[in-house]
Image: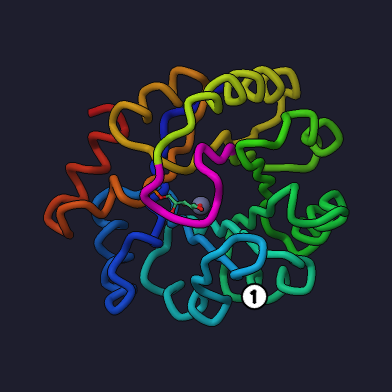
Amino acid sequence: MQRKTRIAPSILSADFARLGEEITAIDAAGADYIHVDVMDGHFVPAITIGPAVVKAIRSFSTKIFDVHLMISPVDSYIAAFADAGSDIITIHAEATPHFHRTIQLIRSLGKKAGISLSPGTPVEMLDNVMDMVDLILVMSVNPGFGGQKFIVSQLEKIRKIRQMIDHSGRDIDLQVDGGINIETAKQAVAAGADVLVAGTATFTGGPSQYETNIRNLRGG
Ligand code: DX5
Ligand code: ZN
């Protein structure tokens, strides 16, 4: 069942010199999840933040910490991100040959598990993990950078996954990440997404705009 649209600002577009204050501000502005993009310079070109930073910013919001790991290898870092205070840990199906095992590991630590598909990855990758995941993340850009253009072909993928989730009868978030703005947010929600990740569109204009930006993404 598609739920009310939730907004997950990606702190990748925040002011890193004031990260704690930025998280307090997006929390107050109505963010539902705090989306943390972890990049390793190997699975994706950029390097961003690690578990120590997640731990340091954790106390600035009581909202759900939604940690998106774009790293390979991944298994050896799961415990550190769990300990740092992640609520949901999302891994990439392409980043590890044994993603079923990695999902088991995340669940064994008492955390919610997410699986992400990059734009070129088919939905069939999800077939054998539908009974284990709490979140499916459709990347609507190739992972690695904020501020890219939404890849329209991913709407069809969202539609297919919406059917798979509804058929499963499980409570699974359908999240979309990359190039989300007011227009693409509407398209993604119409296709079946219920959690929208937005970096640029949340943080544009500075703290005085965050509330308006989040409200607009939610559809007013
Ligand atoms: C891309 C990241 C996204 C990205 C979103 O690899 O996973 O979360 O930062 O940024 P915008 O909303 O600017 O496309
Ligand atoms: Zn992300």
Query: Which residue is farthest front?
Result: 45
Q: Is residue 16 magenta?
A: no
Rendered-image quadrant of the C terminus: top left
* Label 1 crowd bin: few (<14), some (14–19), many (20+), radius 10 Å: some
Q: Main secondary structure of the magenta part?
A: loop
Work out whether 190 lies above or below 108.
Answer: above
Residue shown at 46% from the left, 56% from the top: 145
Asked if ligand 2 lies within 8 A of label 1, the reply is no
- Residue at 51% over, 28% down: 193
Residue pictured at 38% horizontal, 65% vertical: 61
**In this orientation, does residue 42 appear?**
yes
Secondary element type, mark 1: helix
The kind of residue on which mark 1 rests is Asp
Q: Quadrant of residue 135?
A: top right
The quarter of the image holding the N terminus is: top right
Residue for point 52% across, 56% down: 144
**The magenta stretch spans which residues?**
138-148
Q: Is residue 130 visible?
A: no
Give coordinates of residue 92: x percent, y percent.
69, 51
**Is-magenta flag for residue 146?**
yes
Q: Position of residue 119 (x, y in %)?
A: 61, 37
In this orientation, which residue lies closer to the viewer: 108 or 12? 12
- 210 relative to 90 in the view: left or right: left
Q: Position of residue 100 (x, y in %)?
A: 85, 49
